[in-house]
Image: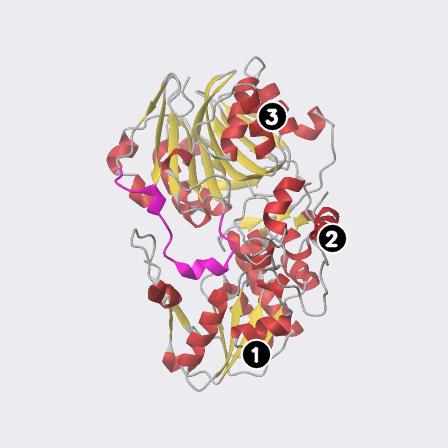
Amino acid sequence: MSFSFAKGCEASAASSAMHTSEFQDFSLYAEDRPQEECGVFGIYAPGVDVARRTYFGIFALQHRGQESAGIAVSDGSQMRLHTDMGLVSQIFTQDTLDGMPGFISVGHNRYSTTGSSIACNTQPLLIDSSDGVLALAHNGNLVNASTQRAELEAQGVEFQTTMDTEVMGRLLETFSDRSLEEALLEMMRHIHGAYSLVMMTHDTLIAMRDPNGVRPLCLGQLSESEGGGWVVASETCALNVAGAEFVREIEPGEILFINKDGLESVHFKEKLNIREDRPALCVFEFIYLARPDSMLLGTNVHHARRRMGEILARQAPCEADIVIGVPDSGLPAAIGYATGSGIPYQEGLIKNRYIQRTFIQPDQTQRELGVRMKLTPLKDVLEGKRVVVVEDSIVRGTTTKRIVQMIRDAGATEVHLRISSPPYQWPCFYGIDTASRKDLIAFQRSVEEIRQYNGADSLSYISMENLIEAVGQPKSVFCRACFDGEYPISIPHDVKYTKLLLGEDNAGQSNGLVSSGDPGPESESDLRELVGETAGA
């Protein structure tokens, strides 16, 4: 059976002239931020146009991935699939959705972390299971995908994509002699990492979350007038546009089956008591990844970001004339900083919201001007002012440097940077596309050195303690590895080395800098020991 076009399934071929090797995000403004992972959505609602609801659901989750999207729909006997590269609004038409009747649907939009940004890596994937064809959509990243893939290939299993999502699918196929529940539990024995999954068979919608709950996943319900159908989604913002009310979050380690008999919940830890896992929701969901109108752990994301700004104003006060934010995720924190400091808030940077994708390869001049294509300074607001600029994070530092210069060019007399997250010093292995550690500016340089590099008059990051206070949840419920190197899920050594070793340039010299006052490892063996001690070995 073909992995992508399974028996009994009809795939509507997407007609696109896109050359996927050239498909890229020209928004260079995003290069200094952790890139989003993926968005997943599913609905079980007999009598409802589920394809169209799924379209609106993944449209609301577009911020979580802009490389490709797909929808699979089942009418009980046949499954139809439509996927393509691009944005949700570019891929689906009225005719496409009209040609996808059914009562269960699964949707996905993707930003690639494991697996290239190419057409064969679109989702949902169609696979074999003990219950027939299963459509699978995944948000997250497995840390042992390469090991599991190698073991399966040694058994003669052939892969058609480069995604870790297919590893999960192929594992399920090897367990097709068991019930679907048993197969899913056995798959969970084998895989480690972050995974929020939405799946469907011909008659059942399934939602599943890894035992640590690194990536979000929630449950909602349609009104009684629409039959009380069920919706699952990465964020609550997608429930709203689908006409569903939030019910609860899918629990870490939970598998939820939804069909004509209602809801059945199975918990990995109760069924297979083989390891202890602490809750570890990615704290960066609150800082940047989630949409501000979403709810996480009972807290509104916008409110948490405002609190970050208010507390940051208390922690790092500044004499200034105005406070501005870097759109979009820096704006709530900027409003909070203004409230906490008493300094007036103003819009100082306007975001061009219509820059999306292009096939045009930028030359060096265009790369230098890339930030100006995305952000425009308001000279009348900034000229002659001492400006506090609030940003959510600094990753490499290059874009922040350009923003500071842009504000100075607009006539600001002083530019003070305030960052609503702690220094970003460690790469993510759980589904956010971040640079190797040697490319993270907070690993390379001290706060003062980062200030000098960016050209700001002052620079302050929120402390970890104040960040946790703003979010209003115990520190222990979060994955904070990007800030403190404490990875909640053990990472295989060969995977760690891909992002944690400094590497060498052609002359054999280390091309990674260390923070001021830190002599750093004296040799590669010392560094390997450091990696083993700090990264969940």
- Helix, strand or loop for disc 2: helix
Q: Which residue is mark 2?
A: 526
- Crowding near pointer 3: few (<14 within 10 Å), some, many (20+)? many
Q: Which residue is located at x 34 percent, y 67 percent?
A: 365
Measuring from the top left, give residue 179's x and y in whole percent. 58, 16
Report the quarter where the C terminus lies.
top right
Report the quarter where the N terminus lies.
top left
Q: Which residues are magenta?
A: 16-36
Measuring from the top left, give residue 533's x and y in whole percent. 75, 48
Q: Which residue is mark 3?
A: 187
Closest to the observer, 368 or 34:
368
Closest to the observer, 7 or 301:
7
Q: Is there a contact, CB below 8 Å, between mark 3 and mark 2?
A: no
Measuring from the top left, give residue 54's x and y in whole percent. 39, 37
Instruction: Measure the alpha-carbon separation of dots 1 and 3.
Output: 54 Å
Q: Which residue is located at x 57 percent, y 22 percent?
A: 154
Mark with earlier residue (1, 3): 3
Under mark 3, the amino acid is Met
Under mark 2, the amino acid is Asp
- Crowding near pointer 2: few (<14 within 10 Å), some, many (20+)? few
Instruction: Measure the alpha-carbon separation of dots 2 and 1.
Output: 49 Å
Please say whether residue 347 is one of the residues in the magenta stretch: no
User: Magenta span: helix, strand or loop, mainly?
Assistant: loop
Tell me if I can see residue 262 in this picture.
no
Q: Which residue is mark 1?
A: 342
- Helix, strand or loop for disc 3: helix
Mark in front: 3 vs 2: 2
Measuring from the top left, give residue 411's x and y in whole percent. 41, 83
Please say whether residue 18 is one of the residues in the magenta stretch: yes
Q: In this rendering, is residue 444 above or below 533?
A: below
Instruction: Measure the alpha-carbon separation of dots 3 and 2.
Output: 36 Å
